[in-house]
Amino acid sequence: MHSAKKHLLAGSVAALVAGAALWLAAPAHDANAAMAKPSAGSIARAQAHINAALNGGVLKTVGGAAVLDSDVLLKIYVFAYSKQPVDYSAILTADTQAIDTPEPVRPTAEQKQQIDRLLQAARAHPTVLIRAREIALFPYDAADGGYRMQNRIFAKLAGKGYFFDNSPYHFVYVDFAPFSVLHPADAATRKTVDAEIKDFEQFSLDIVGRVTAGDKDSISIQPLNTTLKDNVGGTVMRQGAPA
């Protein structure tokens, strides 16, 4: 955990130093005048993202689990479970890994009402669904009796938690170790997976979990079950408690 933070910090420092060097080498200029203004297209795309995430104040669910598919909804869960005053602007302002932070979004009265409805729905729906993409599997390991996964969000499967990026808001898994190896149910499943690995196919993983706690900028999720899917969305294998 600490090494990952140091790595991200080092990258940020290097970028700042490089930026300073470029600034010193450049002729004098008005930084504010030179700063690019958001285009009408980028503003429209950001608003479309917000509207899709808010979904009119209705929580999207699959099998009773809330689909955690946007930074907006993630922050709604953070504020729903952290017992801190709601920051409507923070919920709607895009998370970013860029050095220049985005212009804060000023929520409308309607957007505030939609967020309030989603906060209430989030508290009533602690079970969430996360869809991880670009999952690669290591070849079958006889000692493990299954396949280990390779994906940036599973960097510390056996740890207490991890950050999957360096955005201001995030989630951590309480314990993903029981799901770190996927066990095929039978020989036919193993044969199918082996063939897909040989062809360098990538998979997706549906993770159903329960929100157990909230912090000022994160939520903790206890995984309950996983469903591995092939590159066209077909179910390959399931693991964990029944959905």
Image: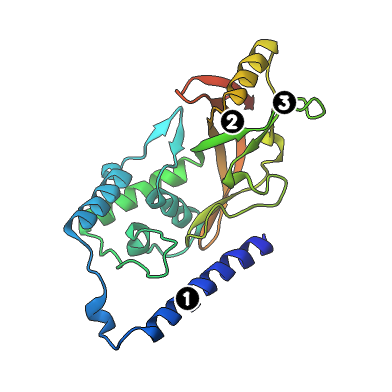
Where does residue 138 sit, x and y in percent of width and height? 67, 32
**Going 33% across and 58% down the picture, which residue do you hit?**
92
Relative placement, left or right, of 174 versus 51 is right
Q: Which residue is mark 1?
A: 18
Q: Quadrant of the C terminus?
A: top right
Q: Residue furthest bottom?
A: 28
What quarter of the picture does the N terminus occupy? Answer: bottom right
**176 or 153: nearer the viewer:** 153
Q: Which mark is residue 226?
A: 2
At which x and y percent is residue 173? 61, 47
Between the C-alphas of marks 3 and 1, the distance is 44 Å
Vertical order, 241 against 189 (above or below)? below
* Kind of residue indicated by mark 3: Tyr
- Label 2 vs label 3, nearer the camera: 3
Q: Measuring from the top left, give residue 175's x and y in whole percent.
A: 68, 44
Mark 1 or mark 2, which is nearer the start of the sequence?
A: 1
Residue type (three-letter) at the residue carrying disc 1: Ala
Q: Which residue is mark 3?
A: 140
Q: Amino acid at mark 2?
A: Thr
Query: Residue 223, how many percent across, how many down?
Result: 61, 38
**Residue in the image at 53% along x and 30% along y:** 202
